[in-house]
Amino acid sequence: MSGRGRLALCAFAATLMAAASMLPLVEPAGWILQAAFLLAVQSGMGALVRRVPVPRALVVAAQALVTLVLLTVVFARQQAMAGLLPGPEAVQRLSHLLASGAEDVGRYAAPAPVTDGIRLMLIGGVLLVGLVVDALAVTFRSAAPAGLPLLALYSVAAGLSGGGADWLWFLLAAGGYLLLLLAEGRDRLSQWGRVFSGAASRSPGGPALGTALAGSRPTAPVRTGRRIGALALGVALVVPAALPALEGGMLFGTGAGSSGKGGGGTISAVNPLVSLQDNLNQPENRQVMSYRTNSGAPQDFYLRILALDQFNGSEWRPSTRRLKDVPKRLPAPQGLGPDVAVTEITSNISASRSYRQTYLPLPYPATEVGIDGRWRYEPEGRTLVGDRGETTRGAQYRVSSLMVEPTAEQLASAGPAPAGLRREYTRVPGSLPKVVEETANRVTQGAANDYERAVKLQTYFASDGGFSYNTSVNSGTGSAAITRFLKEKQGFCVHFSFTMAAMARTLGIPARVAVGFTPGTGQPDGSVSVGLRDAHAWPELYFEGVGWTRFEPTPTRGTTPPYTQQNVPTGDTDMPALPEKGASAAPSTAPSVPDSCPAQMRKQGECGSSAAAGVKPPTDSGTPTSTVIGVVLLAVVLLALPLLPLLWRLRARRRRLGLSAGRTPVRGRTAAPPAGQGTTGSDRGRGIEPDPPGYATARTLAAWQEITDTAWDHGIEPDDSRTPRKAADRVVRLGQLGPDAADAVHRVAGAVEQVLYAPEPRVSTGLAEDVATVRAGLRASAGRFARIRAVVAPRSAVRVVWAAADRWAAFTGRCAALWGRDRWAGWLRRPSRQQG
């Protein structure tokens, strides 16, 4: 194996060893095998392109292009053109997965589940680091700087991991870097060692450095590698130590990861609604959990995950809270008075093995939770959070909760909220447009109290305001999205809940947004199935004496709370039944139609799966013409790229054969003599015009170059060190040509020697016919694959790259002459055969 090949193999191994430090962050660890395979393909592409003498930047570009195609095939095959080429839809899909992965990283505690977004971030990150390492260490022959991307990869893993086997991954990554350094070679290591030790300085002039080192004894590679490795290991130890401590989560900790059982810890999570729109648009309503409950009003059994109580103008998100141990019985709900009717119900919930969430879905307000595993309690939101990687995957738990049944009179007579709570939950950003408050005041005009204002807001969104439910709109959550929603009046639960909560705050009503699931769909066996499409968000408003109270502004989703209706009967409670183990009945994909649908929504036709009456469905004018034209042009370009060598070769052959046959002008003049005829001294005596200067040479050399390139296309590389006669013998021997083709090669070779060395060059006859004979002979002796490759992927097409590189070198040389320096000329210089 050549030195460059060994270096490429070490670069691959070093990247993979550093990537192993990411294994504790996610599970299962099968992604590393996929990353290793794709990394091997990427490295193999670099090795193949480097075998051809092309500029180094083209090697990196080819590897980057292959990396993009690989990621497209793995993560966006359905959106790719022909299942392979990354078109606009594929790029959009990859961008969406990256955004989803960034949100998933903050949502889950380590070890996090390998969602599609996280998997793309992991594999894409490894391929990106591998590309940089291969480019620095192999293509540009500078292995020492390649340690920086390896260090970055390990530092991210060290900063995000919760401890454990950190030293193992550290030693593995460091060993890969040292292996890469030692593989670079004795000379390079000596120079690096002297730079680090201060024994010699690197002068601007390369020859001066070589002269300075020539008379000294070079440092041993192992010794120099130790010095460089010691420095790199020291930096690797300092960088993770300087990173802020991250407790339990990958980017936003759940807090209990390092605090132990009795520690406090904090919780801070990103907006969990990043996947809500995707869940609502899933073609299959895949089950995420099932439950049984003795609630007399199952249509009000919402499963709540957490509450978003901070609005900064760009998004709603949960506050940073202190975590506590889960008490045997949870404290009484905040603000709930003794005169409000409550019924304690019991529910048994089973989460699917495919559903992994750090927060435990619970009916609100829960009073007692029986579950195995490591869980912590956040009192303000009354949520349970997984500790040290604990998730809901396959969890089975029993929950006691309160069914709070306030009356309209109790809500209307609610007193003022505590000053601290009111100040925190009525805060709105200064960037909130005035139209939000103005609309809230207009809609609630004439209301006597906060309860009536809240009901008017709910009715405005659910029926009277002309809003329609649409999950295909932009899912923005900031002030601009709220303004757009009020204007276009189309959206889904995110827009309805966020906008109503923001309006309630402008009216002085404490408000927040809850995230979770609607009650789900009843099954024949008495259980209830909750699917992906049941994901939901709704506003919670605070009323003193009742506490946090659910409202439902989203039409066709969930149920309107009974305390906002009149004459709603209540049912009796039954004894709960334990959930059955194993798979539940197949979930229904049709939305349920609750019996408690209010009259105004029935008139609008918004119960169940009915569409809102009087509201025109969103129209789609189709894909713009400019987009279609752009996609078609992009597809044509991408499909034409593989055919460029073939097209260039056909054009070159036609031009050369036309020149050798006398049909192509030479230096601006047409061929003077008849086809196949030259001129001599006797011709001139008869008045025939002599050949133009260089005419015979150009015709003959064009025919010889066509024979040389045709042989190259069939696997016989040109050898410029041989004479035309010797080169012809080599083509005949390696190409196994027959007598006719062999005679044709020798005739053209003899013509080349005649025009190059004879005192009076003559134009030989039948050059084009000889070229055709040689080409037919080479095709006849070659195999099927060789013939196809000679046409589709001709080797001689590399001359285009060489010509472009020569022009670029000439351009950079002129620029260097203007600037007074020549360092730019080496970046894209074509390497010689001696450079490996």
Image (tube, rainbow, N blue to C red):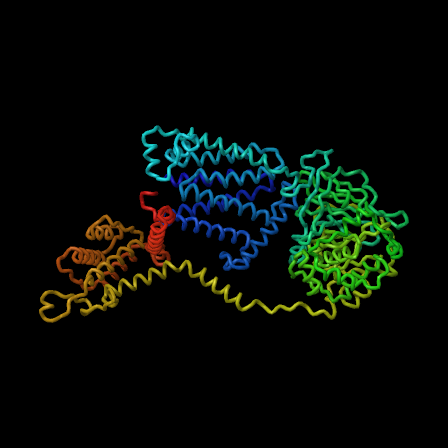
Where is 625 relative to 49, above or below? below
Left or right of 834: which side holds 749?
left
Give the residue at x 63% y 49%.
103
Residue 666 sits in quarter:
bottom left
Give the residue at x 48% y 50%.
67
- Residue 1 seen in this snapshot: no
Quarter of the image where the N terminus is located: top left
Q: Position of residue 683 (x, y in %)?
A: 11, 68
**Residue lying farthest right?**
339
Left or right of 753: which side holds 601?
right
Quarter of the image where the C terminus is located: top left
Labels in figure, total: 0
Residue 28 sits in quarter:
top right
Q: Position of residue 824 (x, y in %)?
A: 38, 48
Q: Position of residue 553 (x, y in %)?
A: 76, 59
Give the residue at x 69% y 37%.
256
Front residue (pair 9, 339)? 339
Left or right of 825: which side holds 457?
right
Q: Position of residue 172 (x, y in %)?
A: 52, 34
Where is 730 relative to 7, above or below? below
Left or right of 737: which side holds 213?
right
Where is 580 relative to 770, above or below? above
Front residue (pair 686, 482)? 482
- Residue 37 seen in this snapshot: yes
